[in-house]
Structures are given as structure tokens and as C-alpha cells.
Image (cartoon, coloured by chain):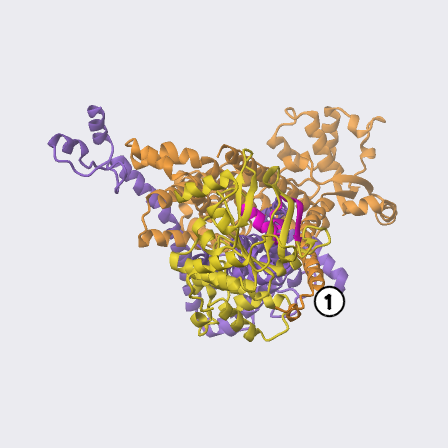
Chain colours: A orange, B purple, C yellow
Amino acid sequence: MTRAHFDPRTLHRHRAAGIWSTLFLGAIIIAIVALGALLYDIVDESFGLVAIENRIDPASLARDGMPLETLDKAQLVEILTGHISAGLLRRLENDLPFEERDRANVYALVLERVVEPKIVKTWSLTDSLTNRAAIEAEVLAEYPQARLEFHAWINSTFIQSPQSSSPEFAGVRTAILGSLWTIVITIAVAFPIGVGAAIYLEEYASDTLVNRVIQTNINNLAGVPSILYGMLGLAIFVRGLEPLTSGAWLGAGDPTTANGRTVLSAGLTLALLVLPLLIINAQEAIKAVPASLRQASYGLGATRWQTIWHHVLPNALPGILTGTILAISRAIGETAPLVVVGASAFVALDPSGPFSKFTTLPIQIYQWTTRPQDQYRNLAAAAILVLLVLLLSLNAAAILLRNRYRRQG
Amino acid sequence: MALTSTKQALVSGKLPGKLPGDLPGETASDTQSLLHKRFRLGETFIQGFLFVCGAISILTTIGILYVLGHESLLFFRNPDVSLLEFFTGTKWQPAILEFGILPLFNATLITSAIALLVALPLGLSAAVYLSEYATPRTRGVLKPILEILAGIPTVVYGYFALSFMTPLLRTLFGADTVEIYNTASAGLVMGILILPLVTSMSEDALSAVPGSLREAAYALGATKLETAVKVVVPAALSGITAAFIIAASRAIGETMIVAIAAGAGPSFTLNPFRAAETMTGHIVRISGGDLSYDSIDYNSIFAIGLMLFFMTLTLNLISNRIVRRFREVYE
Amino acid sequence: MNFISPIFTHTQVQQCLVDTPAAAGNCAIETHDLTIYYGDFCAVRDINLHVELRKITAFIGPSGCGKSTVLRAFNRMNDLIPSARVEGAVLFGGQNIYAPTVDAVEVRRRVGMVFQKPNPFPKSIYENVAWGARINGYRGNLDELVERTLRHAALWDEVKDKLQQSALALSGGQQQRLCIARAIAIEPEIILMDEPASALDPIATLRIEELMRTLAQDYTIIVVTHNMQQAARVSDYTAFFMVDENRAGYMVEQGHTREIFTNPKDKRTEDYITGRFG
């Protein structure tokens, strides 16, 4: 035995190991930095300075030395009548008579229709904080009429306002409601079918060819690009089943659209999309129920369905619900299939039911992102914040559920 | 007792299959009537319903195949379209009836290749770190971060590509070299999008390698790196390969990032700093506009969809097969 | 290699040759007050034992008595368990292997290990043997090393025609002998064996035991076994472990295998041995 046979160079190897472990960690750090950059980018665009130019200076609207904001309702209505066209006035009166409107509402109308503030330039949060002096100088030089103010693009008005053609007044209310309607339909369809399929595969299916095909098929469907589901939805729900999905069969269709590009089609498309995910998750949950429980139930003379209904499902429920929440968050974030199914480019009216035209939060983000003007980019960032908060709370709910389930198990 | 069970027999159905509750036939006639197999209508109905639920997935697949196939057939039957031109033409301009898929296909390949160049090395490195180096506590902190990354909707990544990555690239390489829409930006961000997928699948494969192999390597005087790279990674190679293939399939099918950041309008270019429309990007743009049914434009996106379907399906099937073979070795 | 003489004679020969259990210059490894914790749990406490050079020492005792834990302390395999903590000293060549300046990788190169279940790498037979030598910078001819080692492990004749085939295709007993070959390919000074035959059938077990006797001519071997007949058959020395009321393991006594099995000094050893042998 001669040690001379070996030259282990341990020091060198340890050094290499150290370098590589730093590299491995570096990969994770890059991922974290990317996440940080993404969040920073979104927050950066959601807040910041804006330069606003008014069509009419509010100071010029002052009455008897009283500034605009202190005027009462009657005076405001007077201003409104004096500045806008008769046609628009009639339309507003039509929407809701001025007598029934409160002061705040009229004041908002005066701002929107008479003062007509227009955001002429926006700055990111970083710029606003670090470069304030230069920005002020620039505004003074280029937009002498404009005033500079700090604007949070995400605010309560943004969430409560419907879509609008001017970015100053646009909001995500329509989009949020559209998303909610769509998701309700998605879950109503996908949940029972998904859980049913999972029960069938785990509790009933014997190892026959048909059942193996079903299982393989589900696994493969989970890998089909989401845009193809959109094409399926377009051809089947929107086009093929148009009388059904447009609501024409109930006479409930939206007269302005009267085609299949409705909340219902979108919901059904997303249901097919999340179905494989839901089934696979539910299967895992059902698999985790101990076999001894089933045997105990059968031992007492229960039928197969009694066993499933009374013992298997209650025990698998937390897992199934966790999987369902994850499926919901997937569906909420989906964009491509809905573009294909035919989300409307512009919907200012709240969706009223399954047969309404629709837009959803991600669709709204997509449309704002693709506009060239800066203001829309800010709007998109604010809408992304809303979407991320929504998704984060859903995921938090799923994690809580999972942890509680683990503690019990 | 006997009364209730008789009643039950009238109301509900039989037990399907053999169950622990089933008893073999008895000789005494009394017992025989009690233990006789009953037809339980409810049970049969429920089983039927559940089977239909399972079969809906098959219908979905058939639906996808039928829709894509049917519309593609209409497309290829069109006298203005030839199959040869479809696969070899370098121009996709429906307005002048040029339908060569190569520019779209090429853009898909470029964005996917860039995404994989980012996601595969980083994803595998991260997986090795999580599986072989990280303490349980570190893993508990790092994994949720990757899960957040995986949970962000793709449209948000699209926004990120356009409003962050593209300006960054333009600063780095000059606004003259990098167009506003370019495949590099879309590909890089797509790489970040698939990174968590690669990491989590590879980590699963690495953790499935039995600890005894690591012990064997350490007992031979291997360092942690040698154990991880020369023993654990090769042992998990098939699982890692499967992860890589799934990642490729994800990249090819990814839509929103390329629709937002890669460019609108097919162009046959190998320069990643130029705008080029991918297959998915084209489908989204065409179907997002006012599309009249039965037009050649409408049919053409289904032909693209069919190709997309076969490409991703092939990759998924290969990956599944590899995973299955991998399982056979260790279980 | 072609070891055919009955094992018991060997044991007897050993007993005649060695009389002083702890001759100072013949110590391969020894422990001083070795105590090992897993988190707060004390797995073994205050172990003081020494292992003779080029002899086979067996660790026996009821399950959970920490004999494997002690074995794994000899090449710092316990380092891989994050919660494990070692107190006391393990002296190898006069140096405490738990001293802060000592590199675990260096220790493991000199103290090889064979595990309970055969764990060949999912590589070829050739690669399994060559791997350890390669990472440790072997300077000679690898082909020769592989052949020499496999011959030494009495496996050459069975595998010489399929060196490039996967090691996983071998039988369990062959796999375990391959693992032994893999361990001796890097020329360690000590080979630790953790119940090396417990997963094997009796014939494969016999072959492993024969191999151990052959290897003992060149190597110090420490073997953990739950099979007392095996300890009696193959080992020169035996250390007997027990578990105390706090579930911590401790060493009751060590000595010549013959002494321990025929004339134990401690009542507990006697109870354990007679209880099993009945």
C-alpha cells in the first residue's frame, strides 16, 4: 500500500467546490433579483409625478371670489350648463337627473367635463424622488400651463371607475367584475367535473385500457399551451354554440353584441383549461386518504359511494380545496385564451350576467401595455398591482388551508 | 335490521365489483336471499356520472384535435395555399396570400432558445443548490420565492419585458442596435418565467436520488461538489432531461410575453435584437382583431395552432416516457 | 482470494497469535470519551475503545444501541446529518479527526466504508471502481487498478467480460462485493462495514465473510453486525454495546472475540449472548 499512488489535491478541490457552490447560489440570487426587478418596475410605474394641464383653469370658474371647490351644488350645475353642449347635458340628465345627483357627483362632473384635466407627462417613482428639481424645471419650460403633482395610479377611484377613453379617468372596475364573473362560471363548471373525474380515477377505475387512456390524456392535456384552449373555445363555444352562449335561446342576449363572445364562453374555456390541473390535484388529495379508512367503512357494510361520500371526500376536502384555489389563481391570470375567445377591447359597462360582453383584469393589462402612451403604461402597472394583490391573497389562503390540513393530518 | 336492508335493496343499487363487504354465496336459503347481489340503481348512476366526468377530458382532446384539424383542412384546401409553400415559404403575408410558416417558426425557435439558454443552466444550478447545499431552513425561505415567480401571470411578464428588459437592452447595446420590439427581450424574460419550472422539476429528480449514493460518494473522499455533480446529477439525468423538455414545450407554447414584447408582424430574421412575430404571437394578434369566420386568415391561425399542438405534444410525450423509465430504475 | 480453509480455524489461529489486546503500536483508531448527539438526543455516550491494526473488530449489541453511530463517527459520516454533534476525540494515527484543522474529505479517503444495502453508482462496473480513484487523483493505470481491485475483491472472474455494463444489473451479493472493491480501490487504511451482509442471502453472506478474512491481511476492518454468529465467525475482537435508560448507547466491554463469547467479564454481555444463543 503506497500512498504515492494518489495525488488528491484536496485544497484545490475544496476551492473549486467553494466557487461552484457560490455559482449555484448565484442562480437563485439571479431569480430573486429578477423578481425584485419585476416588482420594482411595477411599483415604480404605479406611483410618481404627473404634469396636468387643464382645459379651463379652475381659478377662472370661481364665483364671487369663492374658489371652485367651495361652491355649492346649484352653482356647480350652473357652471356645467354654461360650459358643455346641450346634447351632452341631455345625456347626463338622461343617465341620472341632476336633481337626484349629490354635490360630490356634480363636482366630479365639472372636473371631468369642464376643467378637463389632461396628464401631459408622467415620471416614474424613482425619477420623482431623485430628480424632482430637474422635473420641475422641465415642466416650467415645456408645459407652462401644467401643474405638477404626485399621483398614485392605484387608488380607490381607479378601482371603482369603469373603463374610460381618457387615461385620467380610466379604472379597472369593469375588468375586475369581468374577471369575477368569468371565474364564477369556471369554478361552477370545473369543480364538480374535476372532483368527479378524480373520484372516478382514484376510486372506481380499474386498470383497463379506457381508464389508462383517460389518465394519460389528462396528464397530456395539462401540457397543452393555453392558447390552444382559446382556439377550442373560439371554434366550439363562441362559434359552434353561439345560440347558447350568446343567450339568444333565453332571449337574454346582449343586443349590442348578439354573438358568442360572452362571459359564458370565456368561463367555459377557462374551465376546460384548468380541468386537468384540478383533476390531478384532487387525485393527489384523494390518494392521501389512508386505505384503512375505506376498509373500516366497507367493513361496516357501506357501499362504495357511501364510503366515498362519508369518509373519503371529507378527508380529502382540504387538499381538493387547496388545489382548486391554485386552479383559480391560474385561471385569473390567464390572458392568451381569452384574447382568442374574443375579449372586448373596450367595455365601459359592468357585466350583468353570463351573456354580457367581457373583459378581464389581465386582458385590460394587456391592452394598456400595448398602447404607446406613457399614461397607459402607468395604468397597466396599477392594474398589475391589483391583480397581484388578488393572486397573493388567493395563494395565502391556499397556504393557510394547506398548513391547517397538515396540522390535523 | 332485515327490514331496513330489504328496503335499501329496493331503493338503491348493487355493489359494483368485489368489495370486502361481499360474501360468497351461502347454502341456507334465508341467508341466500339476504346476501344476494343487489342492483343498486343509485350507485350505478353515480358511477356513470363520474365516468362521464373523467371522459370529458377525452372529449376536450378530441375537440382540440377536431377543431384544429377541421379548420386546417379548410386552410390547406384553399387553392391559394400549398402544403409545400406552407413549410418552406419564408414569407407570411396573408394580405398577399403568402403563407410560409418559417418566419413565425423561426421567431418561436429564437425566443424559446434564448429562454432555455437562461432557464436551463440557472434552473439546474438552483435545483442543485436547493437539493444538495441548502439547509432545510434556507430551502424554506428560497422555495416560496421561486413559487411566487411561478405564480405571476404571463401578461405581467410581458409588461416587464416591454417596460424593463427592453429599455435595459437598449441601454446596454444601444438604441440603434436594439429595436423597441425584439425577440431577445421576450426570450430573456421567458427564461425567468420557466426558471421555477425547471428548478422544481429538477429538484424533484435530484431528491429522488437515494441518499445511499451520496453516502457512497462521500465515503470515497468526494467533496460536496463532486458528489453533487458527478454522482447525484448523473443519477437524476433522465428526470432533469424530462424537465428540460417540458421547459422547451412551455417556451414554445408561451404566448403573452412574445405577443407583447417580441413584435407584431412576421419577419424572417436571425437577429435577436430585431422584431419578429412568433407562432403564438401571430395567433393572438390575428384573433384579437376583428376576425370574420371562414376567412382564410381565420383558417390559417388554426393551421399554426395545429403545428403548435403537435410540437408541444411530441415534447410532452417524450418527457413523460423519460420520466416513466426513470421511475422504473429507482422504485 | 481463493480462500477455502474453514473459518473457525482462522479464528483459532488469530486467538493464538494475538494475546495483548492493546499493544501500543498496533492501534488503528481509538476513541476517548466519544459522545454523539442528534439534536438534544444523546445517541451514544462516553465511548472509549481501540481498534487493532489489520484485524477485524466487530461491534455487536441490541438495535438502537448506537453501534452504527460510532462506526460512522470514524470517517465523519455523521457530519452529513445537520443535527449531529460530536464530543470527545477519535484518534486516527494519533490525530483527532474531529480537530478543527482536519478535513473530512481527507479522513474519508483514508477510512473507507461499505454500507448495509449495496449502493453501487448507476454507472458501469468499471466506473464504479475507477470513480473514487479518479477523483482522488490516481496516477497509475486505471485499467490495471480496476482489474487488481476486482481480483482482490474476488469479483474479477464474474465481471471481467461485462465491465462496461451497468452495476445495477449485478446480483445483490455481487453488488456488495463491488462496493467493497470500490472502497479498497482508493487504498484506505481502515474499512468500515455497516452490517454489510444483512441484505444478502446466506451464500452471498458467506462470500462476503470470506472476503473480509482475506482483506484483513492488508486492512483494518471494523464491522457492525446484528448477527452474533457472524461476529463470532469473522472477527478477532468484539466490542459489545448496550442502551441505557435514557436510550443512549454505551460500550459495555471489548476484547478478544473468543473471550467475549466464551467468558465475558460483564454480566450484561453474558445475558445478551446466552439469551440469543439460548
- How many marks the image carries: the answer is 1
Nearest the eye: A169 or A305: A305
In this picture, residue A364 sits left or right of residue A249:
right
Q: Is B224 one of the magenta-colored residues?
A: no
Q: Can residue C269 be seen by looking at this rendering?
A: yes
Q: Mark 1 lies on which chain?
A: B
Q: Residues within 10 Å of mark 1 (few under 14, many from 20)?
A: few
In this picture, residue B15 sits left or right of residue A332:
left
Residue at left offset 68%, top offset 45%: A381
Residue C2, percent from left and from top: 44, 69
Q: Is C73 one of the magenta-colored residues?
A: yes
Tag 1: amino acid: Thr
Question: Which image quarter is the N terminus of chain A in?
Answer: bottom right
Residue C79, percent from left and from top: 63, 50
In this picture, residue A339 sits left or right of residue A245:
right
Which residue matches tag 1? B177
Residue at left offset 26%, top offset 43%: B17
Q: What stretch is highlighted in magenta?
A: C67-91
Label 1 element class: loop
